[in-house]
Image (cartoon, helix red, strand yellow):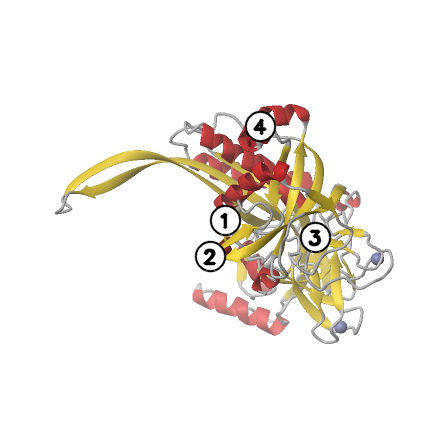
Amino acid sequence: MTLRSTTNRSKSGFYIEVGCPGCGGRLTIESSFFVLTCEHCGSVLRLTMPDTPVVYVVRAKVTRREVRFGIDRYLKSNKLPLTGSDLEFKHIYYPYWKIDAVLLKVRNDIIRVTYRQGEDGQRETSNERRRTDINLTPYLTTVGAGGQFEGIPDTIGMRVDYLNVLPYSRTNTQDGFDAMPVARPWSEAWAEVVARVADIGEVAIADFGMNRTELFNPVASLVYFPYVIVESYAGGDFNRWVVDGVTCRVLAHVDEVSPLDYGEKEAAADLEFGELDVDFHRCPNCAEDLPAEQSYVYICRNCHQMIVHELFARDISQIALVSAQYGQDDLLFPFWSLKMSAADSEKFQHLFGGMYRSDRLVIPAFKVGNFEAMYRLSKRLSAALPQFDLQPIDTFDRRCLPVGLSMSEALMLVDVVICRAELDRNPEGLTQHLKATTEEVSLFFAPFHKENYFYVDSALGSVTFEKSFVS
Ligand SMILES: [Zn+2]
Ligand SMILES: [Zn+2]
């Protein structure tokens, strides 16, 4: 079914090449996926990230001949004499911090709506309407992590969108290439990215209330990108060219002698990096094979251990199923149930708990097309939750859909959902950032069946959402 195969689809297109532990074959995996089936031997594999940044390397694709050719082409187009025979080549890998995060944008605009009236459609009236737009999008950027180096760009830029990377290791780096030390700590790179995002926010001035531009859930990794540095002293003139090791483009031409600054070696000493691991997708307790579908949560069908595939995840206090009479064709959709602190539930329960005064907020544990659709479903389920009869389960029914939205994403969405709900009550727009503390996390599955263009919950028959919401 399409829902399963497209869960958690990523658009970043950052590809990692790894080796299969079963057959040794080379595999390419999109960075946001962590379960894959080996196309050579059929083994189901899992990619595990360490809790320290992973280091990747992009291999150079250009030969000395091609680099020289590239420089000559550059010189020719700038009407300069071509290169001589004394070229010196230096091959380097320059480090970049790669930052993956989620960007939240809340925008308050006043829009002008024009209506045509009358039989002839000639009479026009117009009025102004307040509109609040909430958007959550993946955010990917790179920031230079090495020392100052004239001609080396401070970001890999758009190229990162279709980069093929390998885990950094002795065998994956090329002969003759030197990796530059990391001179800029992560904290500094992150501060720069936060400042960049704040700049975006400042450009958009709210027409009412307050706008919000914020980054959530940052994940850091390090990418070594190849450059070829070519120097020449022909005829007593110094020239240095910095050439992109993937595209062969000349990025900089320096004709004043300046020493190369390779960055401070000491600075890199206290940084810790981890290696990603590719392993068979099995239960860590009893080695039973786990389903080939990507999910953040599994229950081993043999020993019934819960397996949460997420770094820094909190404990899931319970996995439950909504009891109801339902058919074999029903789908069991997963939902995160997040218990708010007593103080917060006092403050926010009017937004979700409805007449049942629930202290829990429900967030769909699968990807829903857009934020507004997710918000409506979250609100309906939060209101319905106190009426559900939840029974703990220790095995997944075949009708259970995979958990396609991680716990950390759900925890982040709590604040955004509260902010959105407050807007319903307060159309003047937000005047403060609302934050809530989540005390406990559990997961439940609720049965839904198809009715025309909708999924309808089979327990109460009252919660519905459009089939097209599920991406
Ligand atoms: Zn294989
Ligand atoms: Zn097991």
Task: Identify residue for label 1.
Answer: 370
Cβ of disc 2 within 8 Å of ligand 2?
no
- Between disc 4 and disc 3, whose residue precedes? 3
How many angstroms separate mark 1 from mark 4 (CA)? 23 Å
Closer to the camera: disc 2 or disc 4? Answer: 2
Q: Nearer the viewer, residue 158 or 25?
A: 25
- Between disc 2 and disc 4, whose residue precedes? 4
Task: Identify residue for label 4.
Answer: 348
Residue type (three-letter) at the residue carrying disc 2: Tyr
Local crowd at mark 2 within 10 Å, few (<14), some, or many (≥20)? few
**Whether residue 355 can be seen here:** yes
Q: Nearer the viewer, residue 337 or 129?
A: 337
- Labelled disc at residue 453: 2
- Between disc 2 and disc 3, whose residue precedes? 3
Question: Measured along the vertical axis of the image, is residue 33 above or below residue 417?
Answer: below
- Between disc 3 and disc 1, whose residue precedes? 3
Q: Which quadrant does the N terminus fall into?
A: bottom right
Q: Position of residue 196 (x, y in %)?
A: 53, 40
Cβ of disc 3 within 8 Å of ligand 2?
no
Q: Position of residue 131 (x, y in %)?
A: 38, 37
Closer to the camera: disc 2 or disc 1? Answer: 2
Residue type (three-letter) at the residue carrying disc 4: Phe
Q: Position of residue 303 (x, y in %)?
A: 85, 56
How many marks can you see? Answer: 4
Looking at the rendered structure, the secondary structure element under dot 4 is: helix
Looking at the rendered structure, the secondary structure element under dot 3 is: loop
Task: Identify residue for label 3.
Answer: 296
Question: Measured along the vertical axis of the image, is residue 129 above or below residue 42?
Answer: above
Badge 3 vs badge 1, beta-carbon distance below 8 Å: no
Residue type (three-letter) at the residue carrying disc 3: Tyr
